[in-house]
Amino acid sequence: MPRPLPRLDLAFAANAAASLGLVRRIEAARVAGRRGDQNRISLTDVELAYELAFLRVFTAWEALLEDVFLRLMCGYERSGVAETLVGGAAPHRTLALAEAAMLHGQQYVLWHNPARVVQRAQSTLINGNFQQVIQSAQARLGQLAAVRHRIAHEQHDASVQFNSVSMAIAGKRYKASRPGRFLRDVSSNPPDRWIDALTAELRSLATQLCT
């Protein structure tokens, strides 16, 4: 009997909301703190919280991609339609079997690079919704991956890529190439913190993958 793809996007949205809630509470605690108190939350603390929150959001996005992909390999249906495996292969009976086929002897695969995600989809599924959604947002997902990469790594290349992304998205560079300053900054149209705007984009893509 066909199995509907579960609303994994809702779990992703809840996870993202928890991360955004963290930075809002830290912002509120900083405002409420007394000036001169050595334990008062600093602006550096706040910016670090934005970086950690975004890293958690992006990690949840990567987990969502893998969870959806494995279920599609098992024949789960989205909107009543199952994706077709390359070569006419039969859907895998279990998630464990699908994962073994996906790993193909590797210990893990990475999901942060949208180009590689598209390649993985092309080698496994025949031009279905999963591939189309990622391809449609490949450039933006690449930018978000660069922000994630800068948070996780201190290499010069990570800074260069992040500076390029912040110029493309916000039209400026940020001191010390810190993503927290960018994520806390406010976009102009509509006015919203970048962390909220970018997370909303991921939520939209998650919904497209699951409904």
Image (cartoon, rainbow, N blue to C red):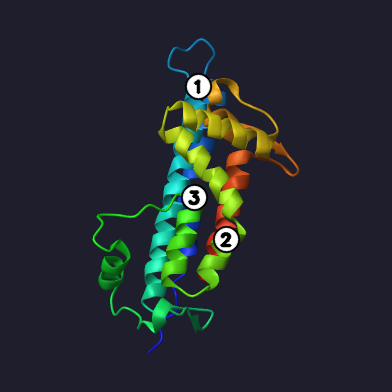
Q: Amino acid at mark 2?
A: Gln
* Residue toward you, 121 or 2: 121
- Mark 2 or mark 1, which is nearer to you? 2
**In terms of sequence position, does the residue under pointer 3 or pointer 1 come before the other?**
3
Q: Amino acid at mark 3?
A: Ala
* Residue at figure coordinates x 59%, y 46% from the top left: 198
Q: Amino acid at mark 1?
A: Thr
- Mark 3 or mark 2, which is nearer to you? 2
Q: Which residue is mark 1?
A: 44
Q: Which residue is mark 2?
A: 135
* Residue toward you, 142 or 56: 142
Q: Position of residue 192 (x, y in %)?
A: 67, 41
**In terms of sequence position, does the residue under pointer 3 or pointer 2 come before the other?**
3
Q: State the CA–CA distance, disc 3 to disc 1.
A: 22 Å
Q: State the CA–CA distance, disc 3 to disc 2.
A: 22 Å
* Residue at figure coordinates x 43%, y 52% from the top left: 60
Q: Is residue 144 above or below residue 126?
A: above
**Extreme-right residue of the structure:** 189
**In terms of sequence position, does the residue under pointer 2 or pointer 1 come before the other?**
1
Q: Is residue 114 above or below residue 25?
A: below
